[in-house]
Amino acid sequence: MASRSGRKITKYPKNLNNINIGVVIFGVIAIYVIISVITYLKRDHIVGYEVKEGSLSTNNIYDAIAIRQEEIVTSDTAGYVNYFAAEGGRVAVGNLVYTVDESGQLLDYLKSQGSDEVTLSDDDLSELRSQMIDFKSSFDEHTFYTVYDFKVGIDGTVQKLSNNSVLQNIQSLNASSSTLKSISYKYSANTGIVVYSTDGYEEITPSQLTLQDFDNSNYTKNQLINNTLVKIGDPIYKLCTNEDWSVVIYEKDPDKVNDLLEMGYIKVRFIKNQNESWGKVSSVTNSEGDTFVVLTFTNSLITFCKDRYLDIELIAEDEKGLKIPNSSVVNKSFYLIPKDYIIKNNDNSTGVLRDKYDEQGNETSEFVKISIYSETDSEYYIDTSELRSGDLLIKPDSTDRFNVGKQDTLVGVYNINKGYADFRQIRVLYENEEYSIVKSNTMYGLNVYDYIVLDASVIDNNDNK
């Protein structure tokens, strides 16, 4: 169509006139934001961790078997046994341990004489209270059978305390009684600690143990009950005759076994009562080829004389330093460059001269800045991103050349104080399953309050310095 002046007028489609350029720009921005958010959510994020001073101690808990020098005393007389020595107490040669009533009429006789009532002293009640507290502190619902051992033990203690009072009354009774004449007094033939139970482990040695012995689910203990009928040859009591005793543990990791042996002595905490004692470390190997660690003590026998199975914790010397999570620790490869090839300028910059050729093919050199991450007596550790394998380095004031390629690995973490991940070498003093203690204030290392990457696996070695 032409206008009156003869000019041609072109009409554009009406839908183009309705497009709002602002809406288009907003839509592009919205799409970009959505893509950015999705990309961000899919990426592994760097989380910082502030380095602080701390300490760790060895936290290894083991099931242990107690091995002692034990002597089972058997009865040479048939009758009803009554104990007078305290279980867990020490007796000397000639001390009264028990009596045997061949007639079985002693209790009825004492009742007839009015001597069957017993009043417990404060010390007696204290002994009972201690047994209850020990049982409560060590009770495990998974080993409910210990409840029955506790019941028998309490019964035995009460009977023993009662018998001590009865013994005092016997002498004041009619010595001509036929009942009293049937009582045999039994005295200790050796010095030791009295225990009123047997379990079949009395003569076993550490080298005779097997892995099955550490499963206490099938363990049985024969409790020797007061005022029961015994025949000749029956076990009456057990005597621990030597203060030296041991606990045996099984550690399947040979490296840990060697570490323990190298210590010589190690502090042991007994879970039952939290007592601590130093044990001498040795090892034995049984006929099946299993190696056990033996910890020998010269004290505390009287405390654990009734226990065959003990839970113990091995405590190494505390190591103090910088405490970091193990997730932060990483192994990183570096080039090893001889120190003679490193140039240190007055502005504190460090670098090397790298051999190169210009566009005309003439040999020349260039200065390449580098960072040093560790050193030996003769070499520096240089990041593999700063040089290339095969680079020729020029020794200053010399014609000597060095071909880059030799590598070694350092243990360290990524420091993010400057906003980017920068490797720092660490020296691990001690570690457990979650944390490591590293030496502080070391060259090329960490300092307290530094920030490091919590999870080193999220760092791309190509992106960090």
Image (tube, rainbow, N blue to C red):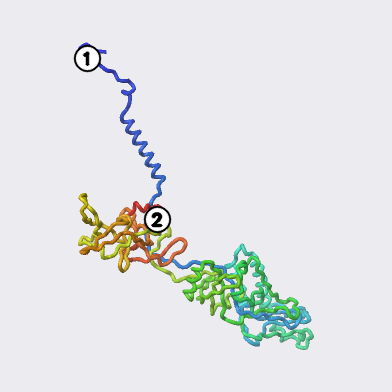
Residue 304 is situated, as x and y percent measured from the top left of the image, at 58, 75
Note whether 57 is above or below 302 in the view shown.
above
Numbered disc 2: secondary structure: helix
Residue toward you, 177 or 246: 246
Residue 422 is situated, as x and y percent measured from the top left of the image, at 33, 56
Say whether residue 102 is left or right of residue 90: right
Q: Residues within 10 Å of mark 2 (few under 14, many from 20)?
A: many
* Residue indicated by mark 2: 456
The image quadrant of residue 428 is bottom left
Q: Residue at x 54, y 77 (%)?
A: 296
Q: Quadrant of the N terminus?
A: top left
- Is residue 167 in view from this perspective? yes
Q: Are marks 1 and 2 in contact (CB under 8 Å)?
A: no
Residue 332 is situated, as x and y percent measured from the top left of the image, at 37, 58
**Amino acid marked by disc 2:** Ala
The image quadrant of residue 388 is bottom left
> Which residue in the rendered view is the most extreme toward the front?
361
* Residue indicated by mark 1: 7
Numbered disc 1: secondary structure: loop
**Amino acid marked by disc 1:** Arg
Looking at the image, tell me whether mark 1 or mark 2 is earlier in sequence order: 1
